[in-house]
Amino acid sequence: MAKAARTAAASGDPIVLSIDVGGSHVKILTSAGGEMRRVVSGPGLTPEKVVASVSELAEGLDYDVISMGYPGPVADNRPSLDPFNLGKGWNGYDFTAAFGKPVRLVNDALMQAIGSYDGGRMLFLGLGTGLGAAMIIRNVGQPMELAHLPYKKGASFEDYVGERGLAKRGKKKWRRHVFDVVDRLRAALQPDYVVIGGGNVDKLDELPEKSRRGDNTRAFEGGFRLWRDKALIV
């Protein structure tokens, strides 16, 4: 870890604490290396609890700046709405002031998308508690609130391919709906490729056309790139 920290310092890059806020866990990792640390989240999670939990998890770690993936829309580096699957009090919360260090806050799907990006036009979809979505087109990142758009029988995309849809309809039907949703979004948005991530991607034995499997750990890499990649625009 010390060697990695010296390398980061020598390159001029700050040491980044990357925070991934999800519906089931809050996870952290620094760009200096080491092991991922996490704590359980859930529907009662507030921003104050995140700050307290992360401060405890990060005890003993050296870092200069923070990247944070938030499960909802972001404006002016702050949450612009309370998240659908967590607690209240997020809208407008100032994480830079709360942590006392520079924070770059982005939508959580966008952070994982950034960590998964290999150029061109990429659509990222995160299958987890809900449905995360983002696009990156030639290094320009755009979070997308697709989860609550109408899909079938008055229900949304998220109602069918999120955790609730999996529990309600079973794995076989859920997989069929995932393929259908990916096909519809690919036809509408015309990406070169689709990355499917999130905690439930492991429940897919096969993937839709022009798709590849993501990895939740790429969210941490996305957080590091937010401070390191000068060509990236979000």
Image: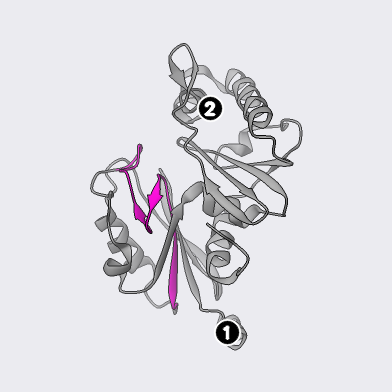
Secondary structure under tag 2 reads helix
In the foreground, 140 or 2: 140
Task: Looking at this view, name the residue that lies furthest to the top.
Answer: 153
Residue 31 percent location from the top left of the image: 55, 72
Residue 88 numbered mark, or none? none
Query: Could you say where residue 166 lies in the image, as x and y percent from the top left?
Result: 51, 25
Q: Nearer the viewer, residue 98 or 62?
A: 98
Residue at 67% of width from left, 54% of height from top?
117
- Residue closer to the observer: 79 or 220: 79
> Which amino acid type is shown beneath numbered disc 1?
Gly
Query: Label 2 amino acid?
Result: Val
Within 10 angstroms of label 2, few (less than 14), some, or many (20 or more) residues?
Answer: many
Provide the residue designation for mark 1. 12
Mark 2, residue position: 161
**x and y percentages locating residue 148 in the rendered image:** 44, 29
Task: Indicate left or right for 223 with 7 as reference.
Answer: left
| Badge 1 density bin: few <14, some 14–19, many ≥20, Cα 10 Å | few
Indicate the quadrant where residue 98 lies: bottom left
Say which quadrant the N terminus sits in. Answer: bottom right
Instruction: Report the residue at 62% width, 24% height from top.
Output: 175
Which residues fall within the magenta stretch?
A: 63-86
